[in-house]
C-alpha cells in the first residue's frame, strides 16, 4: 500500500478484504480531495493593512542562537523584497 493522502472509494472494499483497518483513512468518490496545503492556502486571509501583502508568521526553536535569528530575519526580509509576498 502506498502513502497517498486519500484513496478511491473503490479501494476501500479491497483494503478491508485484506484485513486493513480503513477507519482512519480518507476516501473520495468523484475525484481527489484537496490537499491540506491547498485548503490552508485558500483559508489564509491575514494581510498587512499598510500594503495588502499576505502575512506569513514564523518563529524559532528555543535552541536557535539569537545571532542566527537575526541573520534569518534579514534573509527573510531580502526574500520579501524579491518576492513581494512574505
Image (spheres, helix red, strand yellow):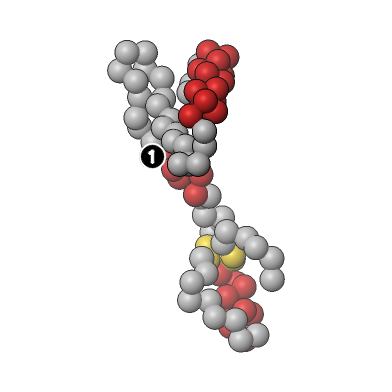
The answer to whether 2 is drawn above or below residue 55 in the figure is below
Q: Which residue is mark 1?
A: 43
Residue 34, how many percent across, how many down? 51, 50
| Rendered view: 68 above or below 39 | above
- The quadrant in which residue 52 appears is top left
Q: Quadrant of residue 30?
A: bottom right
Q: Residue at x 56, y 62 (%)?
A: 6
Observer-nearest of 13 and 21: 21
Q: Is residue 80 visible?
A: no
- In the picture as drawn, the residue positioned furthest to the right comes out as 1
The number of numbered badges drawn on the structure is 1
The quadrant in which residue 55 appears is: top left
Image point (53%, 66%), residue name: 27
Q: Residues within 10 Å of mark 1 (few under 14, many from 20)?
A: few
Residue 6 visible in the picture: yes
Looking at the image, residue 6 lies above or below residue 39: below
Q: Position of residue 32 (x, y in %)?
A: 56, 55
Locate residue 50, reporting x and y percent. Answer: 32, 13
Quadrant location of the N terminus? bottom right
Q: Residue at x 52, y 62 (%)?
A: 28
- Label 1: element kind: helix
What residue sits 34% from the left and 30% below the top?
A: 46
* Left or right, 45 with reference to 22: left
In the figure, is residue 70 to the left or right of 15?
left
Residue closest to the eye, 53 or 74:
74
Residue found at the far left of this picture? 49
Q: Position of residue 7 (x, y in %)?
A: 59, 65
Q: Is residue 47 left or right of residue 35?
A: left
Amino acid at each position: 500500500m502506498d502513502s497517498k493522502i486519500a484513496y478511491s472509494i473503490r479501494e476501500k472494499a479491497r483494503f478491508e478484504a485484506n484485513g486493513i483497518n480503513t477507519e482512519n483513512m480518507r476516501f473520495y468518490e468523484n475525484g481527489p480531495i484537496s490537499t491540506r496545503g491547498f485548503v490552508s492556502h485558500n483559508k489564509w486571509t491575514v494581510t498587512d493593512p499598510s500594503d495588502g501583502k499576505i502575512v506569513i508568521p514564523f518563529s524559532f526553536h528555543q535552541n536557535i542562537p539569537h545571532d542566527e535569528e537575526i541573520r534569518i530575519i534579514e534573509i527573510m526580509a531580502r526574500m520579501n523584497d524579491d518576492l513581494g509576498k512574505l
